[in-house]
Amino acid sequence: MIAEYLEHALQFEKMAQDETDAALKEKLLKQAEAYRKLAGERAKRLELPTPPSPR
């Protein structure tokens, strides 16, 4: 599940990168952040290393 969360985060970040509408871009980045948070929480629960932050 961690990999899936990170994949979703990357997809939202990529969509945000190409977005010209500032409000939509912000929403996409917030969604990516939410998936990264889920990945981090899951890793912590499973006592695995914290996933890397976005570039």
Image (cartoon, rainbow, N blue to C red):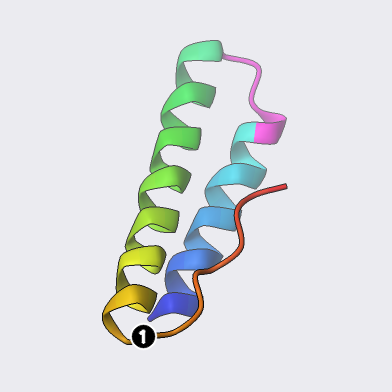
Q: Position of residue 55 (x, y in %)?
A: 73, 47
Magenta extent: 17-21
Q: Position of residue 14 (x, y in %)?
A: 66, 45
- Picture quadrant where residue 15 is located: top right
Q: Main secondary structure of the magenta part?
A: loop
Instruction: Give the residue drawn at x 50%, y 35%.
Output: 29
Q: Is residue 36 above or below residue 16?
A: below
Q: Secondary structure at mark 1?
A: loop
Residue to which mark 1 is pinned = 47
Which part of the image, by quadrant, shows the N terminus?
bottom left
Q: Observer-nearest residue: 22 or 43?
A: 43
Q: Observer-nearest residue: 34 or 47?
A: 47
Q: Is residue 1 above or below residue 5?
A: below
Q: Is residue 20 left or right of residue 49?
A: right
Q: Amino acid at mark 1?
A: Glu
Q: Position of residue 50 (x, y in %)?
A: 49, 70
